């Protein structure tokens, strides 16, 4: 091994998971970067012994709604935004996630206006925490644009030049199509989560349908146009039909988030779009909305990236479940939560255990078959 310097971190007795393989070996971190990788023992007396545990690249999360649960932990309860952001960050880091795209809604899909109220405060709190070195993980922004909302374009334009904004998705949650093709599932979700009566839901549904007819196509095209001018990657959301995917690809979208059917996923994949599915879908064994199973898409070779969506801990668990239950080699399963999202989003400095990459690392041990996060490093600095 290269002669050790005073501030180097040497990790030994680890089962390293690289992009191509997994093997027993050691790793040297210098100045926040991976400087050396080798098989077998390092021979360094003060090396950190991982006890034969796994060493994975730091996980990359491109779509999580988890912050909302900290800002509004119960109906009618609003938590201080700065405190909520830091609590969210701690949960993200503890899940082994070292880069997170906080998905913030632009445009309402309900009547409580919570998302509109939290948007400016959340962006401000995320920026201030990052500038003051308060974060464990690195936080970037994913703007989720609800295209059927009347004011979505004007609101989105407020953030168009923010350097934290690195991903934009185009969503349409109007019931009767896409995620909520089943009206029964729509009613089950909104009544269970928000307590709407059937009469209130019918009123909402009627209004959303009117807004969809008036705004969706116009806003979708306008937002994609704005993003193209600034080289911001765009994602379609909940594509269901061949026509949905052809429209998305035709507009230049490069990511297909949560396609709801195998047909949509297949066409998206064929058109070179990265297919993203929810890690909770893998963990639960299916979609909570009754849509296509992520495991089915994995078996068909149509799954590129996993997102924790609403459960941060699902990201690591889903990768191991792909390996343990579906026989996906661990390097390939890990790639879906690390190097694949990094590539999709142009983060070429991270996402894999390789010399010259940022030392974002996760030490994982297994209890029976359950992966446990033991320690986490970002740029070589321990954060968990």
Image: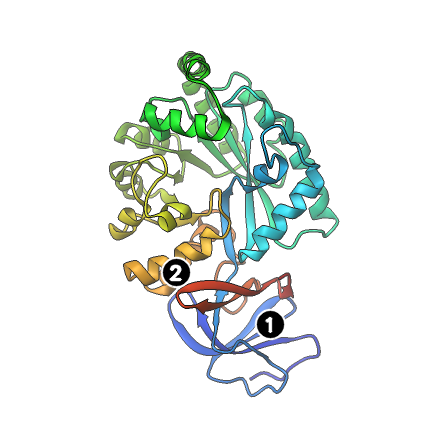
- Left/right of residue 240 with respect to residue 236 in the rendered view: left
- Quadrant (top left/top right/bottom left/bottom right) for the N terminus: bottom right
Q: Which of the two discs, 2 and 1, labels the residue nearer the N terminus?
A: 1
Report which quarter residue 217 is drawn in: top left
Question: Alpha carbon of mark 2 to alpha carbon of mark 1: how far?
Answer: 25 Å
Q: Residue at x 34, y 32 (%)?
A: 239
For this rendering, which residue is in front, 226 or 144?
144
Tag 2–tag 1 contact (CB < 8 Å): no
From the top left corner, tell me how far across and down residue 244 is, in percent. Answer: 32, 29
Q: Is residue 142 above or below residue 60?
A: above
Residue tagged 2: 320
For this rendering, which residue is in front, 149 or 374?
374
Q: Residue at x 38, y 64 (%)?
A: 331
Q: How many dots with numbers? A: 2
From the top left corner, tell me how far across and down residue 350 is, in percent. Answer: 53, 58
Q: Secondary structure at mark 2?
A: helix
Q: Secondary structure at mark 1?
A: strand
| Mark closer to the observer (2, 1) | 2
- Left/right of residue 184 with respect to residue 106 in the rendered view: left
Q: Residue at x 63, y 40 (%)?
A: 163
Q: Is residue 53 above or below residue 249?
A: below
From the top left corner, tell me how far across and down residue 342 is, in percent. Answer: 48, 52
Q: Residue at x 44, y 54 (%)?
A: 337
- Mark linked to residue 299: none
Residue tagged 1: 29
């Amino acid at each position: 091994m290269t002669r050790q310097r005073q501030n180097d971190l040497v990790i030994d007795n680890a089962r390293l998971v690289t992009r191509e393989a997994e093997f027993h070996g050691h790793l040297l971190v210098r100045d926040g970067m991976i400087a050396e990788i080798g098989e077998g023992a390092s021979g360094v007396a003060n090396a950190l012994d991982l006890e034969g545990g796994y060493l994975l690249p730091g996980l990359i999360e491109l779509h999580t709604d988890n912050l909302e649960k900290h800002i509004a932990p119960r109906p009618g309860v609003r938590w201080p935004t700065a405190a909520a952001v830091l609590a969210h960050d701690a949960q993200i880091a503890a899940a082994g996630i070292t880069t997170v795209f906080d998905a913030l809604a632009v445009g309402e899909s309900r009547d409580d206006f919570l998302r509109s109220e939290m948007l400016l405060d959340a962006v401000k709190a995320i920026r201030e925490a990052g500038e003051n070195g308060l974060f464990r993980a690195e936080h970037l922004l994913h703007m989720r644009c609800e295209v059927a909302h009347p004011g979505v374009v004007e609101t989105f334009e407020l953030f168009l030049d923010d350097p934290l904004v690195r991903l934009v998705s185009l969503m349409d949650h109007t019931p009767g199509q896409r995620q909520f093709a089943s009206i029964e599932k729509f009613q089950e979700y909104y009544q269970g989560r928000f307590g709407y009566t059937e009469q209130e839901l019918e009123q909402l549904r009627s209004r959303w349908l009117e807004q969809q007819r008036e705004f969706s196509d116009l806003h979708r095209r306008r937002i994609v146009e704005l993003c193209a001018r600034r080289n911001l990657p765009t994602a379609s959301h909940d594509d269901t039909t061949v026509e949905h995917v052809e429209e998305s690809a035709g507009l230049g979208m490069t990511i297909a988030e949560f396609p709801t059917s195998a047909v949509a996923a297949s066409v998206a994949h064929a058109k070179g779009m990265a297919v993203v599915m929810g890690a909770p879908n893998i963990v639960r064994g299916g979609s909570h909305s009754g849509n296509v199973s992520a495991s089915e898409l994995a078996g068909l070779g149509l799954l590129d990236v996993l997102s924790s969506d609403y459960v941060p801990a699902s990201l690591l668990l889903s990768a191991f479940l792909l390996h343990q239950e579906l026989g996906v080699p661990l390097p390939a399963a890990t790639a879906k939560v690390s190097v694949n999202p990094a590539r999709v989003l142009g983060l070429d400095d991270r996402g894999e255990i390789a010399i010259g990459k940022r030392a974002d690392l996760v030490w994982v041990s297994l209890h029976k078959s359950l992966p446990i996060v033991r320690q986490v490093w970002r740029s070589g600095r321990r954060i968990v």
